[in-house]
Each structure stands twice: as C-alpha cells, then as structure tokens.
Amino acid sequence: MSSRSVFNKQALTPEKLLKKFIQQGLVVVDTEYELALHYFQFVGAYRLKGYLYHRINSETKQFTDEFSFDTLRQYYEFDRELRLLVINAIDRIEVAVRASMSNVLSLKHGAHWFLNPSIFNETREWSHEKIVKTLNKDTAKAHNREFISHYYKYYEFPELPPSWAISEVVSFGFWSKTYSVLNQPTDRKAISMKFGIDQPEVFRSWLHALTVLRNHAAHHSQILFSPIRVKPSHYKSKNIHFTAPESFDSLSIILAYFLGQIGLGEEWLGQLNPLFQKYPAVSTQDLIKY
C-alpha cells in the first residue's frame, strides 16, 4: 500500500500567507508591513520560504529564534544579486573556454574539426552524432544572424559553418560535454593548459561544475543555503581542496581561479566583497551551509 496521501492544501492570498508567517514568529515591524506584503505578492511566499526553512522547527513550525523580515529581505536580495554576478563571471569564462577550444582544435584538426568522428570517444551521454545534431539545431535557430546566413549564401559544403562561427551559437554545456569526449590526451591537455591546469580531468570536472552553476543561476534557482549538486575535483598539485564540494563557496574558488587566469580575478572579488557589506545579515559561512 502506498504511503503517499492526497494533496489538499488550498491556495492562500499574500495577506494570509504573510499573517501565517508572522504567527510562526516572523518579526515584521509596522513600518515594513507594506514592503513585506509587496515581497509576498511579487516574489512569493514559497520562494521566500527557501531562505528561512533552516530557521524553522520542523515539528512546531515556529522560528527557532527571533527572525525579522529585514533579514529575510537581505537573504533574498543578496542571492538575487549573487546570481547576476555569477552569470556575468561565467559569461567571461565561457567566451575564453570556447575561444581556446576552437583555436586549439581548429589549428590541429581543421576549421570543421567537429565533423571528424575520429577525434571523439562515443559515450551514452555525448557522441559525435549528438555533437553534429546539436550544431545543426543551434545553427538553424541562428539562421538570421549575419555571420551564419553569410556562410550559407556563399558555401554549400561543409554542411556547417567553421568552428569560429559555430562558437557563437552553442551553449557552454556544449563545450563542456565536447571536451569530455575528446579522445586525444594531447588535445585535452593543450586546452586545459591555456588556463594553467595540467590535469585535464580537473579541467573537465571544473567545466562541468561551472555549467551546472550557470544553469542554476540562469533559471533563478537559490544559491544561498542551497547545494549546487555537483562535486568538482580537488586540484592537489595547486593545493586547491574543497571542504564543502557542493556549496557555492567551492564553486566561487573555481570562478576566481578561471577569472584569474584570464586577468579578471580582482574584478570578481571586487564585486563579491561589497555584497556582504551591502547585506550585513549574510555571512560568508552562509555560502557553505546547505
């Protein structure tokens, strides 16, 4: 017999939801009531709850200690701004990775290296067939972009534009997965060494971790108090170890490393540190908890 039950909860208005949270112990001063109601209406109680579940007793449903709406607001706004910084940082890294991969592989295997099945391993998750299928789909979506239409206006063969053109239309995930199936160790190392990483497996792991983080941020998923569900490899030769592998704190180390390699490491720290000053209710330890 199934232990599951029938869902019968009724939807509540933002006013009633806010009242419920106040009854559970959320402190809302009179001058902040309208602002709190605004957040419950336009952010949503369910989303906001993600930032305070760890402060609520699972049995009594009451806050374990005094918890103010202002703290909740700071958690939410910190997380929102952090996601924007993450997307901006990974955008820089993505461009650097795809340029490096395109350059290395084009110089060695030709401008249409991705059409050569002999340089790839076949896996269930990613194969040469899937690479070409993805490129055809993404190129078709971008058919109105001038550099794509220009290729098909003047060239009939090969079936796809050269590497430096397709680089502009495929996702970061494409590069991460394609790197993982390159079958020549010299290719993998030539690419990873562009970023000072002499262990291709570490580079592969870090690329994958960044694609997961990017998707997390791009889809408005919570970072604060939330695991990213990916475990990047330690880089022992450079003494890079992750005490909480699935936390944002670990991934921020990878972000800082890559940005440092492309000359933007100080820019990242210069953007991240002021967030903690702007939202003093948040501590660096909150990026490790989950």
Image: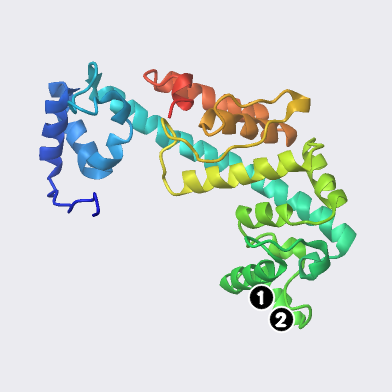
Of residues 148 and 39, the one nearer the viewer is 39
Q: How many marks?
A: 2
Judging by the rendered image, the residue that carries numbered circle 2 is 153
Residue at x 77% of width, y 68% of height: 162
Q: Are marks 2 and 1 in contact (CB under 8 Å)?
A: yes
Q: Is residue 52 visible?
A: no
Q: Is residue 233 above or below residue 270?
A: below
Label at residue 149: 1
Q: Is residue 82 visible?
A: yes
- The amino acid type found where label 1 is placed reads Ser
Q: Quadrant of residue 243?
A: top right
Residue 202 located left or right of residue 32? right
Residue at x 13% of width, y 33% of height: 20
- The amino acid type found where label 2 is placed reads Lys
* Residue 16 x, y percent position in the rendering: 10, 39
Quadrant housing the C terminus: top left
* Residue 122 x, y percent position in the rendering: 72, 63
* Residue 241 x, y percent position in the rendering: 66, 25
How packed is label 1: few (under 14 Cα within 10 Å), some, or many (20 or more)? some
Q: Is residue 144 above or below residue 24?
A: below
Residue that lies at the very extreme toward the bottom in this rendered image: 156
